[in-house]
Amino acid sequence: MNSKELVLLAANACDDKRAENIVVLDMKHVSLIADYFLICHGNSERQVQSIAREIKDQAEEKGIDVKRMEGFDHARWVLVDLDDVVCHIFHKDEREYYNLERLWGDAREVPVEDELMTGMNEQQ
């Protein structure tokens, strides 16, 4: 599975758990950390954990190794490292505070809705 397919899988997992404001940043020309950052938020600690768990479960279902998951117990900012894709699942308050989209402002935003629709069409 390439990194674009992987970020689509993660975005679908977020969508399944009703994550809000899902943003995908193309990091390939900005950072060596990952090809994509996925950023989203939940409105409660329980929802943040549910989103993170769904990403992990769907990745493992496809045989993808989750490198690490950090922040799960506190559920204010959970990082799910899928190697080429790093998912940042925030509690709404922390997302506004850290504002990763502005911090990584040089990265091109990938329109998630277009990607989700493309992925759905390819699966049919």
Image (spheres, rainbow, N blue to C red):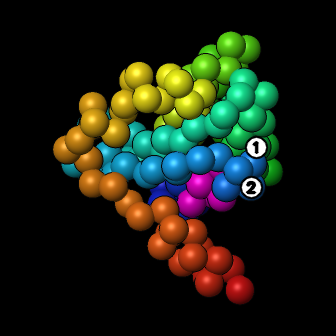
Residue drawn at 56 percent across, 31 percent down: 92
| Disc 2 to disc 1, C-alpha distance | 8 Å
Q: Quadrant of the C terminus?
A: bottom right
Viewed as shown, does residue 43 lie left or right of 34? Answer: right
Viewed as shown, does residue 42 lie left or right of 87? Answer: right
Instruction: Give the residue pinned by disc 2.
Output: 16
Marks 2 and 1 close (CB-CB < 8 Å):
yes
- Label 2: state its secondary structure: helix
Image-quadrant location for residue 52: top right
Position of residue 47 relative to residue 59, above or below, is above
- Label 1: state its secondary structure: helix
Position of residue 118 relative to residue 15, above or below, is below
Camera-side mark, 2 or 1: 2
Q: Amino acid at mark 2?
A: Asp
Q: Amino acid at mark 1?
A: Glu
Instruction: Give the residue pinned by disc 1.
Output: 54
Q: Quadrant of the N terminus?
A: bottom right
- Residue 84 shows in the view: no
Numbered range of the magenta stretch: 8-14
Mark 1: few, some, or many residues within 10 Å (few <14, many ≥20)? Answer: some
Q: Position of residue 18 (x, y in %)?
A: 70, 50
Residue drawn at 65 percent across, 36 percent down: 42
Q: Position of residue 61 (x, y in %)?
A: 79, 51
